[in-house]
Image (tube, grey):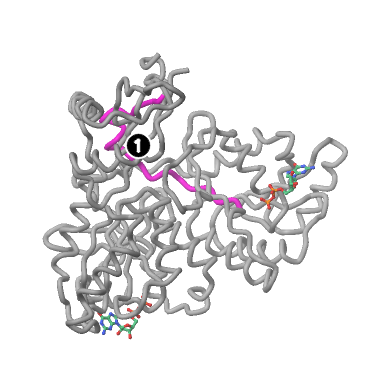
């Protein structure tokens, strides 16, 4: 049974692991209710929901890995971020703009039954001037008679509308063929020292000091990075040399651009954050230590947790915190970050340069944890002993057993426990804590799931 499960899990071989490539990105845009989510489900094939043990985090994922005819790509569902009704057209245009920035190819979904609306025209305008390949899907063409409706969408000036029914799957394969043709070849870009610089996302709400930190770190040596070969999707990264190592800070244009309007809207802030995380291996979340922690700070931390990236939380403006408050602030921070005790913390000042030298070791450690693999034999020996000392609670008169455990993947580390019965959440969290204590993993999220033998 375990062997069959293991075979199913597609445990990545070392080869694959080091070849964690950045896949080409397809962004699905369109106004609410045109069928974006339905189409995305169609593209990725409905999958079982993964139960994640991260309390308090809504897992409204928006990026998915998809495969069509053997080619892999990432789908970004902008439908997950449906804007509210106020200022809708403006928001839709901004949404399209962001999709353009993060995608290699854009799939623009229009409701063929309704026809092109004002909002569709606006999006069409943004997309036309983007220079990126755009594929126009005329959705809700549920039968042949309706195909005629689709032809009216030529008016959007985006070329041929592809009639499709996301709901019934009609012509969705043809649409995917067109998408595939437009996608760039998967760039041979890889993680790891020898394979190009590590990628860092510098995150934080407006005014926490992101630009200041970036300037301090980069100094005069700032190098603006050209688009990667084969893709056009990150012309806004910067290569920064820190302590003898080159790091790639992703999406820095969004940081340098003093775009108050965009930053004001949580909706777009979240979208940019996710886009940056998508490209990064490790996130530095900047927090203003001179002010109380806000909802927005916690939301950003939530997005990092959701992304599965390594994380360093940097408390900036430490120079503004007076001596006697520091102790209490530290305790307060412990309390606030109780959900992510594993995040590495540094207290810095982008202004005075205080403790800037601690930042790099922290991100190095976080990345190291993130790609750590625990040998199966060691893991099982450790768990056997742990279970002997502290057996799982009895359920329904039965004592569940952990039969075998393995680390299914790294980046982030995921562990699977094969059990003879249900393990209580508290017990699973206990195991997670002990795995952390035993094997490190500071700065990295880890996941512990179980597979129960039926
Ligand atoms: P989104 O807001 O753009 O993500 O749209 P949804 O995917 O949530 O779809 C909105 C509504 O349109 C839902 O009720 C869907 O069932 C319906 N819908 C989506 N695709 C089709 C289609 O191809 N044909 C028909 N008739 N309805 C569809
Ligand atoms: P961003 O919006 O996150 O890019 O923040 P900025 O880098 O523009 O910083 C916002 C304000 O905070 C500016 O006035 C900075 O000079 C100030 N600031 C940034 N870092 C520090 C710091 O460590 N200490 C102090 N006292 N002020 C800082």
With 134 as the anchor, is 260 left or right in this view? left
Seen at 63% across and 59% down, the residue is: 82
Closer to us: 290 or 245:
290
Seen at 49% across and 29% down, the residue is: 70
Measured from the top left, where is residue 35 in percent x and y? 70, 48
Confirm whether residue 409 shows in the render: yes
Toward which corner of the image does residue 336 lie, by quadrant?
A: bottom left
Confirm whether residue 62 shows in the render: no
| Mark 1 burial class by Cα count in 10 Å: few <14, some 14-19, many 20+ | some
Seen at 41% across and 41% down, the residue is: 186
Question: As displayed, is residue 102 above or below residue 389?
Answer: below
Question: As displayed, is residue 308 above or below residue 176?
Answer: below
Magenta segment, which residues?
9-28
Toward which corner of the image does residue 340 lie, by quadrant?
A: bottom left
Q: Is residue 35 magenta?
A: no
The quadrant of the picture showing ligand 2 is: bottom left
Closer to us: 417 or 388:
388
Measured from the top left, where is residue 93 in percent x and y? 62, 67
Closer to us: 282 or 230:
282
Seen at 44% across and 55% down, the residue is: 232
* Mark 1, residue position: 427
With 180 as the anchor, is 305 left or right in this view? left
Measured from the top left, where is residue 168 in percent x and y? 74, 34
Disc 1, SS: helix
Quadrant in the picture for the N terminus: top left
With 142 as the anchor, is 285 left or right in this view? left
């Amino acid at each position: 049974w375990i062997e069959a499960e293991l075979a199913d899990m597609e445990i990545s071989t070392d080869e694959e692991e080091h070849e964690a490539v950045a896949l080409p990105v397809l962004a699905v845009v369109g106004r609410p209710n045109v069928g974006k989510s339905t189409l995305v489900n169609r593209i990725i094939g409905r999958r079982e929901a993964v139960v994640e043990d991260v309390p308090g985090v809504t897992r409204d994922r928006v990026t998915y890995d998809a495969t069509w005819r053997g080619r892999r790509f990432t789908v970004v569902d902008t439908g997950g971020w449906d804007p509210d009704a106020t200022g809708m057209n403006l928001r839709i245009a901004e949404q399209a703009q962001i999709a353009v920035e993060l995608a290699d190819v854009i799939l623009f979904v229009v409701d063929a039954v309704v026809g092109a609306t004002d909002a569709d025209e606006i999006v069409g305008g943004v997309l036309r001037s983007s220079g990126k390949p755009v594929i126009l899907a005329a959705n809700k063409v549920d039968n042949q008679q309706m195909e005629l409706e689709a032809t009216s969408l030529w008016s959007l000036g985006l070329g041929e509308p592809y009639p499709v029914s996301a709901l019934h799957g009609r012509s969705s394969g043809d649409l995917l063929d067109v998408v595939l043709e437009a996608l760039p070849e998967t760039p041979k870009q890889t993680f790891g020292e020898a394979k190009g610089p590590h990628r860092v996302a510098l995150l934080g709400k407006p005014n926490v000091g992101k630009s200041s930190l970036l300037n301090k770190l980069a100094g005069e040596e700032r190098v603006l990075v050209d688009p990667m070969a084969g893709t056009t999707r990150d012309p806004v990264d910067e290569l920064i040399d820190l302590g003898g190592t080159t790091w790639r800070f992703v999406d820095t244009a969004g940081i340098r651009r003093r775009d108050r309007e965009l930053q004001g809207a949580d909706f777009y802030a979240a979208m940019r954050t996710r886009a940056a995380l998508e490209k990064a291996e490790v996130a530095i979340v900047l927090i203003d230590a001179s002010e109380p922690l806000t909802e927005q700070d916690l939301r950003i931390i939530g997005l990092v947790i959701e992304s599965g990236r390594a994380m360093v939380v940097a408390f900036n403006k430490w120079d503004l915190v007076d001596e006697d408050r520091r102790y209490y602030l530290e305790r307060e921070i412990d309390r606030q970050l109780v959900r992510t005790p594993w995040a590495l913390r540094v207290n810095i000042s982008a202004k005075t340069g205080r403790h800037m030298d601690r930042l790099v070791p922290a991100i190095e450690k976080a990345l190291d944890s993130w790609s750590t693999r625990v040998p199966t034999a060691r893991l099982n020996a450790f768990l056997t002993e742990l279970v002997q000392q502290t057996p799982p609670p009895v359920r329904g008169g039965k004592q569940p057993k952990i039969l075998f455990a393995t680390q299914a993947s790294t980046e982030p580390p995921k562990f699977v426990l094969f059990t003879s019965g249900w393990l209580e959440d508290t017990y699973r969290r206990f195991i997670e804590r002990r795995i952390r204590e035993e094997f490190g993993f500071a700065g990295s999220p880890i996941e512990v799931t179980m597979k129960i033998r039926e």
